[in-house]
């Protein structure tokens, strides 16, 4: 019988698109593609669309060589790894995705949270390659994260490990978070939070407000706009304190920043590192790096495939460490 243990499929399920990749066990992508995410009727078509797309994109001979499928989803996974507990963007509640895909394709499946998948992807093939302890932070519409210790995701007892966007921030403001909480980190330290802070700053100063993006705020900072500079200083202070608190708890060697805000590059990373150094425990200060993520939209598919490989097969340990 032909050896099937030489290819993997990584999948990243997003609210807009589902991304796929067929790769070998060393992470070399042979084929990648994407399809729109159909969230109609509480997302009931998504699992079928995944299977249909795989069959349409990978011929039977290649499919027979697939060791397993890793799937990253935007929500927590049940402790037994079988069920998507909740995925707001997909309108999912208690979806047994692992069982559904395995029954349809007769290939083993590993489920994990999408931010955790991205963290593993950056460790395996990205900015943290060669490291096994890291904090991965996504700064986009919201704030997400993943913690990797000794090469494994810190998932927690309730599959909520790494939900750093919901660290509470002490503030006189009263910002409502999508989780239902108030003044969560992502209401201040996300792209949306940065723009909200800029709007509030101009409102208090009696200055006119024109629609802005987070990129516009960074551009205003570069032009020495005093309001934008003050807003960014507060942004960095809040984010720096929160990340320093995590570092004081897990003491890792790398902090990897992804998401749309990471495109600001050194304008984000340098002041963030300074703030973190100001707040971390002295033994940690100057002994960690803050880097921009390298894999972009492919981080999740790499990490999902890696998660399957490491959780189901030790044959390739030499290839992946």
Image (spheres, helix red, strand yellow):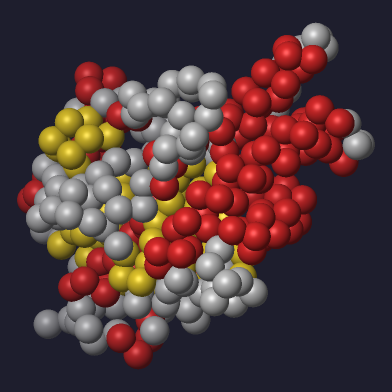
Q: Is residue 106 above or below residue 228?
A: below
Q: Is residue 2 above or below residue 222?
A: below
126 or 47, nearer to the observer: 126
Asked which quadrant contains residue 250, the reply is: bottom left
**For this view, does 261 lie left or right of residue 98?**
right
Q: Where in the figure is residue 42, as x and y percent of width and height?
A: 22, 23
The mark tally for this picture is 0
Q: Is residue 118 above or below residue 182?
A: below
Q: Quadrant of the C terminus?
A: bottom left
Asked which quadrant contains residue 102, the reply is: bottom left
| Residue at x 58% of width, y 30% of height | 193
**For this view, does 192 lie left or right of residue 13?**
right
64 or 223, nearer to the observer: 223
Q: Quadrant of the N terminus?
A: bottom left
Q: Where in the figure is residue 81, as x and y percent of width and height?
A: 15, 55
| Residue at x 26% of width, y 58% of height | 155
36 or 158, nearer to the observer: 158
Q: Where in the figure is residue 116, as x and y percent of width and height?
A: 36, 56
| Residue at x 73% of width, y 54% of height | 271
- Can residue 71 be spotted in the picture? no
| Residue at x 57% of width, y 38% of height | 189
Farthest residue in the bottom direction?
318
Asked which quadrant contains residue 316, the reply is: bottom left
- Can residue 171 be spotted in the picture? yes
Q: Where in the figure is residue 25, as x and y percent of width and height?
A: 35, 76
**For this view, does 58 lie left or right of residue 145?**
left
Farthest residue in the right direction?
223
**For this view, does 63 lie left or right of residue 26?**
left
């Amino acid at each position: 019988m032909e050896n099937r243990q030489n290819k993997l499929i990584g999948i990243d399920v997003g609210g807009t698109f589902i991304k796929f990749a067929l790769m070998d066990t060393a992470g070399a992508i042979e084929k990648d593609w994407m399809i729109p995410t159909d969230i109609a009727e509480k997302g009931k078509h998504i699992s079928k669309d995944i299977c249909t797309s795989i069959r349409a994109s990978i011929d039977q001979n290649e499919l027979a060589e697939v060791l397993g499928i890793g799937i990253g989803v935007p929500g927590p996974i049940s402790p037994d790894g079988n069920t998507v507990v909740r995925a707001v963007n997909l309108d999912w509640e208690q979806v047994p995705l692992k069982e559904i895909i395995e029954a349809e394709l007769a290939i083993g499946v590993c489920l994990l949270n999408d931010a955790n998948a991205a963290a593993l992807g950056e460790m395996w093939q990205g900015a943290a390659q060669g490291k096994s302890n890291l904090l991965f932070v996504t700064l986009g519409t919201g704030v997400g994260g993943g913690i990797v210790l000794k090469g494994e995701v810190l998932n927690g007892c309730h599959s909520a490990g790494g939900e750093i966007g919901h660290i509470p921030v002490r503030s006189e403001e009263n910002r409502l978070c999508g989780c239902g909480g108030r003044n969560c980190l992502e209401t201040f330290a996300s792209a949306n939070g940065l723009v909200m802070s800029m709007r509030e700053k101009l409102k208090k100063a009696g200055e006119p407000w024109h629609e802005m993006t987070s990129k516009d705020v960074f551009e205003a900072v570069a032009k020495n706009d005093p309001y934008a500079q003050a807003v960014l200083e507060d942004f960095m202070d809040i984010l720096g304190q929160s990340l320093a608190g995590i570092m004081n708890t897990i003491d890792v060697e790398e902090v990897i920043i992804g998401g749309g805000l990471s495109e600001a590059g050194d304008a984000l990373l340098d002041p963030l590192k300074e703030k973190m150094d100001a707040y971390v425990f002295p033994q940690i200060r100057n002994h960690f790096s803050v880097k921009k993520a390298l894999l972009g939209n492919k981080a999740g598919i790499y990490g999902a495939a890696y998660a399957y490989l490491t959780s189901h097969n030790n044959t390739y340990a030499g290839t992946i460490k």
